[in-house]
Image (tube, coloured by chain):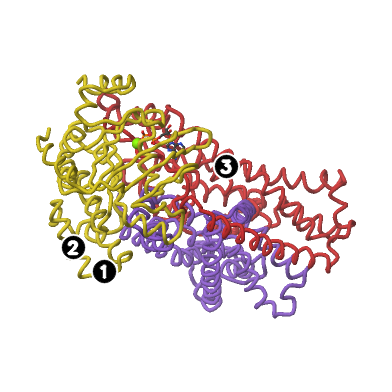
Chain colours: A red, B purple, C yellow
Amino acid sequence: MRIRQPRKQQGSVLFDAPGPRARWLNRVLGVVTAIVVLGVVGLFVWQLDRKGQWAWALWEPFTEAKVWQSFILPGLKNTLSAAVVAAALALGFGVIFGFGRLSERRWIRMPCGAAVEFFRAIPVLIMIFFAQAGPPVIADAFNRSIEPISAFEAVVIGLTLYNGSVFVEIFRAGIRAIPAGQAEAGYAIGLRKSAVMLRILLPQAVTTMMPVIVSQVVVLLKDSALGYVIAYEDLLNAGFVQIKSNFNNLIPAAIVITGIYVAINLTVSYLAGWLERRSRRSRKSAAVPLPADASALLATPFSKGPSI
Amino acid sequence: MDWNNFYDKLLNFGPFLEHSNEIWSGFLATIRLSAMAAVLALVLGTLLAAMRVSPVSVMRATATMYVNTLRNTPLTLILLFCGLGLRDTLGFMAQAAPTVSGYWLAVAGLSAYTAAFVCETLRSGINTVPIGQAEAARSVGLPFSQSLRLVILPQAFRAVIAPLGSVLIAMIKNTSVALVAGYFEATATMKQLFDDVGATVPLFFGFAIGYMILTLPTGLLFGWLAKRMAVTR
Amino acid sequence: MMDSAPAVKAVAANGNDAPLVELKNVNKYFGSVHVLKDIDLVVRRGEVVVVIGPSGGGKSTLCRTINRLESIDEGTILIDGQPLPIEGKALARLRSEVGMVFQSFNLFAHKTILQNVTLGPTKVLKLSKAQAKEEAMRLLERVGIAHQAEKYPAQLSGGQQQRVAIARALAMHPKVMLFDEPTSALDPEMIKEVLDVMTDLAREGMTMVVVTHEMGFARNAANRIVFIADGQIVEENTPEEFFTNAQSERAKDFLSKILVH
Ligand SMILES: Nc1ncnc2c1ncn2[C@@H]1O[C@H](COP(=O)(O)OP(=O)(O)O)[C@@H](O)[C@H]1O
Ligand SMILES: [Mg+2]
């Protein structure tokens, strides 16, 4: 009779059920907040108006198919292709270095660990800069010469190394989240270490890791905008450089481009949340999923992520 | 094989030392930006978190909208908007010296962006406190303000140390993007040296180590604090 | 299990029989689910009322409405003749007079055992630190945890934690104590140590409302059994009557399931 769960977390930790006075206070606070928010937004709108930013001429380009065909969609395509290629490579990096970090051999484990900690500790942008300018210099040191690194390649390299390192940690945390009994049961039926990893831990860890992996893709997508800095012609560039130089409408362009980024990322974030809820319900893994927001912790040097 | 060239490109830390003044001021600029943005992000993030857990639906909606927008927008876009939009188009801080406006626009963009993450971190910290703790506090007769101050926030605070450390470290790394708002810090210095003296391996590693000196001790400090203050349940 | 029953009941019988807790026509909904239906219940000073019934029947909810951890939709609740305040300082003051013991203990995880017990007295009753500590040590002594006063809750066993929780509630000198399945989260060997403390309390004349599945305790310590199913009070009876000669089919059915083993 003692196997009852305590009541599930529900309602607010912070507040009692409101009485009449609390409800009145809440209403007043609601009205005050609404006034402040409307005031701030109104001020911004008014400031835009003062600078003539509501002129139809500045917004009209976004109703033209040509603007979408020649600027926005190609920019979006470049953003997405950099993100997709980098995500695929980063996953590969994550799996390889992840196995490396879990290896029992010191000489494999140490360098893999060092690389991961290094890439997690430094800004992506300096990797992108060096990915673009460094290889020709290194080739020159060996008296070779190579093709210049394209902006696309530099962005992909930077994103791959950083996000790959985060994937390594997601991967490790995913394996760690599987209860020890699973591996022990595997050894008990006579499986070897590699078989325990491949047949027991990994399949369960995939379910566990999916939500974080997907939410790390949002980080990757956002970081792809760093390509702007090295003149990669991505979505950001399409809005802030190309459209702006054609129509001199930076503010409208910025607003439209922001809308596109937010829509894409919200969709992917939603997917991550959905996966998390789904794998919480799923019976296919002995572990609870890593929460989708664990990726921030896993991107931190020396952090092993959330303790579950 | 030209061994001098080989040495210069791969091993010679000479240029790094020759430009140590510029590099030092670059990292100083990074630190100045980090410190100010951290404080403002913490303040704004706390305010947003308070709104997000409040019983006032307008507050919750406002904060949610802010967080969802800022978290899902690239920081590069935000900082670029601060420079090209706020200053160049709307004339915000247009009269100030470029170094001054660059600093404050970078601070504004970076702290506005980071505040969204601070908010979410604080909110999930509050959610780690089991509802039973609050019910016990109420049952003992503690009024709202005291249950919050004596029971809930102290526990939430402990749960939040490690994730806040992550947010802070991410923010330090993110200062590198401030160059698009026209603020000249360490990464901009590195880019300039790449252009002036070449993108040599020692130069890159020098800057990487500089960033690691900022991020790694911060990470260790927060990890240690979090472990020390952890609440065992 | 315990054979001290007559002594307990004698105390209650001698007690003042003014109503201390009164629920009149209480109704409560969770969304569209009607969890408390027209509840009328009177608990007199010094009385021990044991609430039993099938899971999901509304026992916890009933218990929690008495200090307004759950709000009610209809009806009135009086404590010591006064209507239950709805919010604010008045509600906090009332809660300080009603002790609550939870199934999952809910000791403040970041405070030591001693601090758990002294928090209310220093902050709500405004006792001095020294006074609060002295009294806390006395209560901890009484529940047998005094030597662990400097530990944190997580370092104690479940039974010990629950005894601390009882001491924490007693430190506020409550008029009535509410227990919501205080032993349901405990390993079997720890149940007795908690029930012993509760039996002592009952014997000393504390007014108690106890939700429990411990039939031994109900038999020995209760003045009255309240059987709740589907949000309704199906039967109220003395323990002897209830366990030997229950009136309602629901109660008979419930007892046959529970007492078989
Ligand atoms: N916080 C809540 N939200 C919605 N329904 C609830 C909540 N708490 C309890 N209930 C429902 O109310 C009914 C009574 O629950 P409860 O009082 O916990 O029963 P008992 O303690 O007798 O097992 C159950 O059907 C339960 O599912
Ligand atoms: Mg219950």
Gap in Å between the C-alphas at discs 2 and 3? 63 Å
Q: Which residue, given by chain and number where applicable, does mark 2 sit on?
A: C135
Q: Which residue, given by chain and number where applicable, does mark 1 sit on?
A: C127
Query: In this rendering, does residue B185 appear at all?
Result: yes
Q: Which residue, given by chain and number where applicable, does mark 3 sit on?
A: A87
User: In terms of depth relative to the viewer, which is nearer, C239 or B101?
Assistant: C239
Q: Is residue A279 above or below residue A246?
A: above
Image-quadrant location for residue B177: bottom right
Would residue B156 be found to the left or right of residue C189 on screen?
right
> What x and y, as percent, mark residue B4?
51, 66
Q: Give the amino acid type for the residue marked by disc 1 in the picture.
A: Leu
Give the residue at x 11% y 35%: C2
Gap in Å between the C-alphas at discs 1 and 2? 10 Å
Q: Nearer the viewer, mark 1 or mark 3?
A: 1
Image-quadrant location for residue B215: bottom left
Q: Chain of mark 1?
A: C
Image-quadrant location for residue A117: bottom left
- Tag 1's secondary structure? loop
